Image (cartoon, grey):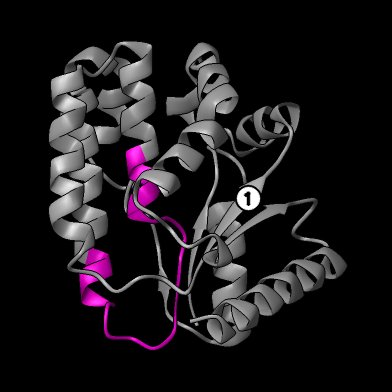
Amino acid sequence: MRIGILGPIGSGKSTLAKMLADYYRYPLLEEPVEKNPYLPYFYEDKETFALLSQNAFYSALFLLMWKTKDLPHVICDSTLYSNLVFAEMLRLEGFMSATEVALTYAIADAHLKRLPDLDMQVVLMRPKDELFRYVRKRGRTIEKGQEDYLNFHYDNYYDVLNRIFKNYKVDKNKVLFLELDDINDPKEFERVRLKIETAHKLAMKKK
């Protein structure tokens, strides 16, 4: 089972991915963005660091996915499609030019075909007020004062992601949009796990 977890900032991707990896005892591919040296510079000056940071995030994630491409089982707390969502929204906000985003897509076009498809793309869904609450709760210094950026991100994430899925012809049977409650509640985790497992089995039958 090769699963990718997507969702807007603060939706619980990393938490759910770790819980699934622990439950199934599968390798966990952790998004390298948080430890990337470009991240604080991006939040301080998006106009200067948008393209550089997105390429850095994409390159680091691609390398991890390349190293795990032959594993039969892996849980990824991000996918390359998620990086494209961020690039597209940075264009919409005016932080990246059309030329810069076109370059980002060209890089993605060349590299996505070199990786095996994930079995499932699990997209986490939460109301905007909950997303803001989770971001405040985790208290990352670099996310303070980013309300306008986050507000735009939350308002546009799912529409942009759907367009990218359509553009790359991602099989709808391999995409699960999943509303999430308190994932630390054992009953909620079991509900979510069974939803993912059922969707995965159906997707594999339709291969």
Q: Mark 1 points at which residue?
A: 124
Where residue 93 appears, x then y in whole percent?
A: 37, 13
- Which residue is found at the position 25% from the left and 25% from the top? 41
Badge 1 crowding class, 10 Å Cα cut-off, few under 14, some 14 to 19, many 20 or more, is: many
- Asked if the magenta segment contains residue 197, the reply would be no
At label 1, the amino acid type is Leu
Where residue 12 appears, as percent x and y from the top left, is: 61, 50
Q: From which residue to which does the magenta span run?
A: 64-84
Foreground: 159 or 192? 159
Front residue of this view, candidates 127 and 147: 127
Residue under the point 69% across and 28% down: 128
Q: Along the horizontal axis of the image, is 160 left or right of 116?
A: right
Task: Determine whether, in the image, residue 135 is placed left or right of residue 34.
Answer: right
In magenta stretch: residue 68 = yes
109 or 67, which lies in front?
109
- Give the residue furthest to the right: 187
Q: In which quarter of the image is residue 52?
A: top left
Q: Position of residue 68 (x, y in %)?
A: 28, 77
Question: Measuring 34% from the left and 43% from the top, which residue is drawn there?
Answer: 83
